Amino acid sequence: MKYWILSALILLSGCGYQPASHYAKNIVGESVSTEVVVSMEDPQNTVIIKDAVDTAVITKFRTALVPKNTAKTHLKISIGSVSFTPLRYDTDGYVITYRTTVTMSIIRTSEEKSQTYATKGMYDFEIEPNAIISDQARFEAIRQGAQKGIDAFVAQIAAQGANSK
């Protein structure tokens, strides 16, 4: 048993595995600033998405969040749309599961170069039959959807970083 564990450790340590955050950091650098364009149609969603973006920058990119004038990379996020789609109904025909879809456009500016990314995050949640979506459930669904959209963006950046090596 010890032989197998030791063999697996040796094999994995020599494979050159790097986490996605390592490759993403190659693209965005050591410092990042963020800006979320305020949607006049739904300004509350903007605040939720701004928090999700800032959390993702710190946790996923493992970089410092700094003011725009000192950042190596600036991310400008625009909310394309937020939608709620019924997924499942109970036997009486009432919606019991919704899917939230958050679409965003992200412009990454580094060293006078800009690149635009389109990303989408989805989150499924349940409600009680014959009930409306509460504000708390709505905000949580948008936050989760935005977080998943940011995760998709991180994957795009990591793929770019892996290909640039």
Image: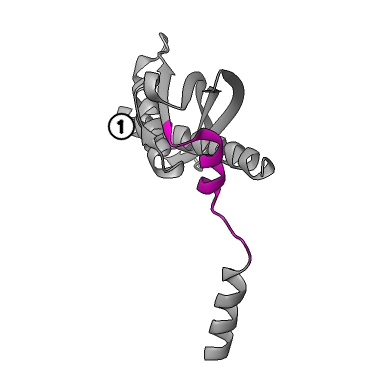
- The residue depicted at 47 percent of the width and 34 percent of the height is 145
Q: Is residue 107 magenta?
A: no
Residue 84 located left or right of residue 117? left
Q: Is residue 43 above or below residue 149?
A: above
In percent of the image, x 38 and y 18: which residue is there? 69
The residue singled out by tag 1 in the image is: 136
Horizontal and vertical percent position of residue 123: 49, 38
> Could you tell me residue 26's position as x and y percent?
55, 40
Seen from the viewer's position, the closer of residues 89 and 24 is 24
Name the foreground residue: 99 vs 11.
Answer: 11
- Asked whether residue 6 is in view, the answer is yes
Extent of the magenta region: 15-31
Coloration of the structure image:
one colour
- Left or right? Give the position of 4 relative to 64: right
Magenta-drawn stretch contains 17:
yes
Q: Position of residue 140 (x, y in %)?
A: 36, 35
Residue 1 showing in the rendered view: no
x 42%, y 38%: residue: 56
- SS at mark 1? helix
Q: Nearer the viewer, residue 37 or 63?
A: 63
In the displayed orientation, state which residue is furthest to the top. 40
Task: Check the picture and name the quadrant holding the N terminus.
Answer: bottom right
Q: Quadrant of the C terminus?
A: top right
